[in-house]
Amino acid sequence: MGVGESGAALSGKRVLLVVGGGIAAVKIPDLIRRLRERGASVSPVLTRAGAEFVTPLSLSALAEEKVYTELFDLTDEAEMGHIQLSRQADIVLVAPATANLMARMVAGMADELATTVLMATDKPVMIAPAMNVRMWEHPATQRNLKQLRADGVLVAGPNEGSMACGEFGPGRMAEPLEIVDALGRHFGSGPLAGKRAIVTSGPTHEPIDPVRYIANRSSGKQGHAIARALGDLGADVVLVSGPTALPDPPGVETVHVETAVEMRDACEAALPADIAVCAAAVADWRAEAAGQKLKKQEGQPLPQLALAENPDILAGLAGRTTGRPELVIGFAAETQNVVEYATAKRKKKGCDWIVANDVSPATGTFGGDRNAVTLISAGEPETWPPMAKTEVAERLADRIAWYFGHDGPGAPE
Ligand code: CTP
């Protein structure tokens, strides 16, 4: 989304900004400046730890608002109580959201003003996590993230990159402009604002031993383009990506996985969602991976691969009895009888729509930039003219927006 659009969406919005205690707090003055440039007002609440990184004075100078630090800032209950403070905002933004602050949110602790406000609010809450990569990947933090999502908390970032602690990986706070865009999307810029989508993309790698794996030639181009197109229409998108050479699409939360089982788990962790688009070329089978590298042994029989069937992620999402995304969309790669085979696949998988691609060698679809597609839904099949994968993505996103009741170019022709 362009800055102009997020600007329009943020104009007049009141952001209660809870500042956690991490080095990323040094980006908060810039975040405040960017929000105010777009017409939002910002009331900062510093956690005790946050006050170790930025001073109340610097934040109040930028925000031109009172900065709250302790519960006793609110002694004059007649003037402003913590309940009122938590309710007067349009959204509560927690940035940086440290591992500790996320844990306290999950536990429902109200041990200082910032956490008390988070408990008392009846407004949407968005977190921008920031922490060391190990802390981010720790099962406790991942558990907490899952719980916060299930509680309806919105998540912006984190990004991958080098960190103040000298390590590299996911855990770096999203840039101020990315947080501004995430807020803009939340406040309704785009026909899919308020909708959450899960998109799978790329191949999966199924290990044979610590150095070898089974894979396929999927590039991830189509799935990544769909994630981006849905994000551009304002959806809150989680892209679950197998190994690809593609950069993470901007404005989309990307979860990197290797195997089908990891992809399935990441999709389930990203629920609840309104939309699921399964564009990944998931390996049908996984090998029973050897713990050590398989060695050539002269005179010995060749190693045998014992294969087990992988979970069908699309069928699993479509078949959920609770928490099924309202619109579940799969892909079918066919070389002949495209409509007939894809129609049967739609039924077998229990999904709502199937995007059937003709992958006969003449089309150059696999690994290429173009795609020839037929959309199979409950109605008449629609064959789209061959077009760029990015155009297929935009057209599909428009169709999804149309499905959710918005007028637009997505209506079936
Ligand atoms: N899919 C999935 N999990 C799997 C296998 C497939 O989510 N374990 C999804 C793919 O992302 C895609 C659709 O199911 O949306 C494709 O179904 P699949 O049965 O694999 O069809 P094809 O790849 O077209 O292969 P085949 O014709 O051999 O069934």
Image (tube, grey):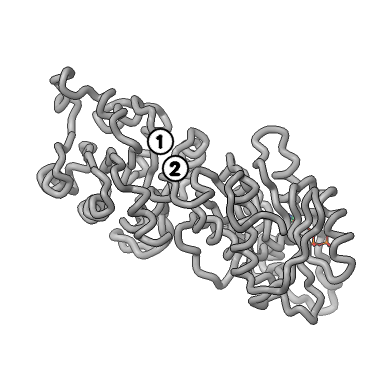
The residue to which callout 2 is attached is 154
Quadrant containing the N terminus is: bottom left
Q: Is residue 10 above or below residue 301?
A: above
Quadrant containing the C terminus is: bottom right
Task: Give neighbour class at mark 1: few <14, some 14-19, many 20+ (Cα, 10 Å).
Answer: some
Q: Position of residue 127 (x, y in %)?
A: 38, 44
The disc labelled 1 sits on which kind of residue?
A: Pro
Of residues 274 and 157, the one drawn nearer to the viewer in this rendering = 274
Disc 2 within 8 angstroms of ligand 1 (CB): no
The disc labelled 2 sits on which kind of residue?
A: Leu
Residue 287 visible in the shown view? no
Q: Position of residue 32 (x, y in %)?
A: 23, 50
Element marked by disc 2: strand
Residue at 75% in and 76% down: 296
Describe residue 358's horizontal placement relative to residue 40 as left or right.
right
Q: Position of residue 124 (x, y in %)?
A: 40, 36
Describe residue 121's horizontal placement relative to residue 273 as left or right.
left
Of residues 185 and 69, the one drawn nearer to the viewer in this rendering = 185
The quarter holding residue 21 reads: top left
Describe residue 381's horizontal placement relative to residue 74 as left or right.
right
Of residues 315 and 350, the one drawn nearer to the viewer in this rendering = 350
Describe residue 34's horizontal placement relative to residue 294 as left or right.
left
The quarter holding residue 70 reads: top left
Ligand 1 picture quarter: bottom right
Disc 1 within 8 angstroms of ligand 1 (CB): no
The residue to which callout 1 is attached is 124
* Badge 2 or badge 1: first in the primary sequence: 1
Q: Residue furthest top?
A: 78
Residue at 66% in and 41% down: 326
